[in-house]
Image (cartoon, rainbow, N blue to C red):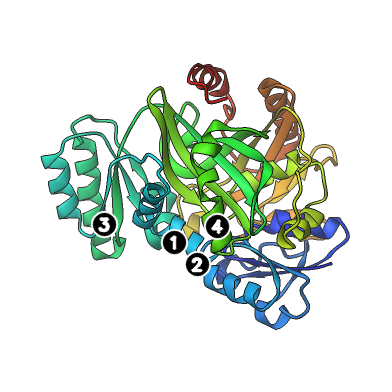
């Protein structure tokens, strides 16, 4: 088949490259101009994806913001894997997402949307509590701006809001304050074929902070651990309630909902109505069937059960300076065009992220400093971690760094989840 991959930042290179290796024809377009070197030497790149619509058997969109285009293409009879106008709103407009959760009779945490920092500061002063600051719209792509307060009186949140006001002014856009609760952070995800969710569901645990033991700034993600399950109380109470609505809205793709759970219940935090990163790379290692065939089955509305590995999958990003920050000079000085060396020519479980290929060498490109995602799998979490670490040990990248504790929380989290009846 002919696959056209439309990417916002080049994050879906691994997907495009995998489908190509399975024997399909693949063309890839990257919207962000500064990221367009990504994928050179791996797949055929195009400068205008719209010129290749008729060529494509299936079109894959890898990010939010393309929902209206996806709806139009589906209505025109194309097989499309991606978002919809409705699911774009679920992710990008946090207030809309929370209202939709309430409409579907799903318990939510108290939250409020703000347009000015002074208004938000006054709210915290009048209602002292621990809060999470969540940017909305395009600003939420800057993951470092998400701030999780720890002070029960909200003094740290007030300090952070004042800092944002000083550095961003009116350019920050809208943001949400959500009351913080303690518990286990867990996400449930599923593929959707236009009418139904597809089993099994994916249960994952994100590691968002820069350093081990959840220290440092939020990065979006440094790694994830996961497993597949045909039954999930968390799915039934959250995502499962959206099946009829997603069918009505014509959604065909992948959707994830992140939650905090504790002994008092399940509290959805936010939607990701597209591929999750690095979630999709790790999922790929747990799926025991060709990715291209799977996308065809999903986009053509087939009812199926995905063949997946038993046990656990785990993955960690290998990154280079200036990650998790953006600094063009630092990136060009320390990281751009750095060669990725393999001590043994074994690339199984090694997923190229912001990479190009020249004379069979893998070189770092882009501008964010995310080089690779390295995965492992096993019947136990320890087995999966051991495989991942062995694969990382086979790789040499100048100035690279990564978290060494991805998956460690499972031993404690699993006990809590079992006690609460959620596994």
Is 307 displayed left or right of 176 in the figure? right
**For the residues marked 2 and 3, what is the alpha-carbon distance in whole angstroms?**
32 Å
Task: List the residue tagged with mark 3.
Answer: 167
Task: List the residue tagged with mark 2.
Answer: 85
**For the residues marked 1 and 4, what is the alpha-carbon distance in whole angstroms?**
12 Å
**For the residues marked 2 and 4, what is the alpha-carbon distance in whole angstroms?**
11 Å
From what the image shows, is residue 213 above or below residue 103?
above
Q: Earlier in the sequence, mark 1 or mark 4?
A: 1
Tell me if mark 4 has few (under 14), some (14-19) or many (20+) residues whose alpha carbon lies within 10 angstroms of its own: many
**For the residues marked 1 and 3, what is the alpha-carbon distance in whole angstroms?**
27 Å
Q: Earlier in the sequence, mark 2 or mark 4?
A: 2
Is 240 displayed left or right of 90 in the figure? right
Q: Quadrant of residue 236?
A: top right
Is 404 displayed left or right of 171 in the figure? right
Check whether the beta carbons of the residues at disc 2 and disc 1 lie within 8 A of each other. Answer: yes
Check whether the beta carbons of the residues at disc 2 and disc 4 lie within 8 A of each other. Answer: no
Quadrant of image for the C terminus = top right
- Spot occupied by residue 221 in the image (x, y as percentages of width and height): 52, 42
Tell me if mark 3 has few (under 14), some (14-19) or many (20+) residues whose alpha carbon lies within 10 angstroms of its own: few
**For the residues marked 2 and 1, what is the alpha-carbon distance in whole angstroms?**
6 Å
Task: List the residue tagged with mark 1.
Answer: 89
Label 4 SS = helix
**For the residues marked 4 and 3, what is the alpha-carbon distance in whole angstroms?**
39 Å
- Spot occupied by residue 368 in the image (x, y as percentages of width and height): 54, 55
Viewer-side label of 4, 3: 4
From what the image shows, is residue 73 above or below residue 218?
below
Residue 246 has which mark?
A: 4
């Amino acid at each position: 088949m002919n696959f056209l991959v439309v990417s916002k930042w080049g994050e879906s290179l691994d997907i495009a490259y995998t489908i190509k290796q399975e024997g399909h024809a693949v063309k890839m377009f990257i919207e962000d101009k500064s990221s367009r070197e990504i994928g050179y030497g791996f797949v055929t790149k195009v400068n205008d994806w719209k010129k290749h619509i008729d060529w494509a058997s299936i079109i894959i969109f890898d990010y939010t913001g393309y929902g209206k285009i996806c709806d139009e293409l589906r209505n025109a009879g194309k097989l499309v894997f991606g978002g919809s106008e409705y699911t774009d709103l679920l992710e990008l407009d946090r207030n809309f997402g929370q209202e939709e959760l309430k409409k579907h009779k799903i318990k939510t945490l108290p939250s409020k949307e703000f347009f000015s920092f002074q208004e938000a500061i006054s709210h915290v002063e009048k209602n002292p509590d621990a809060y999470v600051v969540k940017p909305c719209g395009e600003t939420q792509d800057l993951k470092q701006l998400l701030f999780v307060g720890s002070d029960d009186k909200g003094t740290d949140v007030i300090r952070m809001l004042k800092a944002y006001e000083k550095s961003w002014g009116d350019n920050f856009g809208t943001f949400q304050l959500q009351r913080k609760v303690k518990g286990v952070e867990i996400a449930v995800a599923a593929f959707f074929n236009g009418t139904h969710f597809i089993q099994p569901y994916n249960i994952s645990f994100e590691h968002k902070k820069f350093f081990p033991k959840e220290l440092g700034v939020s990065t979006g993600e440094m790694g994830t651990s996961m497993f597949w399950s045909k039954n999930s109380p968390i799915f039934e109470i959250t995502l499962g309630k959206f099946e009829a609505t997603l069918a009505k809205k014509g959604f065909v793709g992948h959707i994830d909902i992140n939650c905090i759970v504790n002994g008092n219940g399940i509290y959805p935090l936010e939607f990701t109505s597209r591929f999750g990163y690095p979630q999709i790379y790790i999922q790929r290692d747990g799926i025991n069937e060709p990715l291209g065939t799977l996308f065809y089955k999903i986009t053509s509305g087939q009812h199926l059960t995905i063949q997946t590995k038993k046990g656990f999958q785990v993955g960690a990003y290998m990154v280079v300076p200036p990650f998790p920050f953006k600094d063009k000079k630092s990136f060009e000085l320390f990281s751009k065009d750095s060669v990725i060396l393999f001590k043994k020519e074994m690339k199984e479980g090694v997923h190229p992220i912001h990479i190009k290929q020249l004379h069979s060498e893998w070189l770092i490109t882009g501008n964010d400093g995310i080089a690779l995602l390295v995965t492992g799998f096993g019947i136990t979490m320890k087995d999966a971690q051991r495989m991942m670490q062995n694969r990382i040990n086979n790789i040499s990248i100048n100035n690279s760094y990564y978290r060494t504790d991805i998956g460690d929380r499972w031993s404690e989290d699993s006990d809590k989840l079992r006690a609460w009846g959620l596994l």
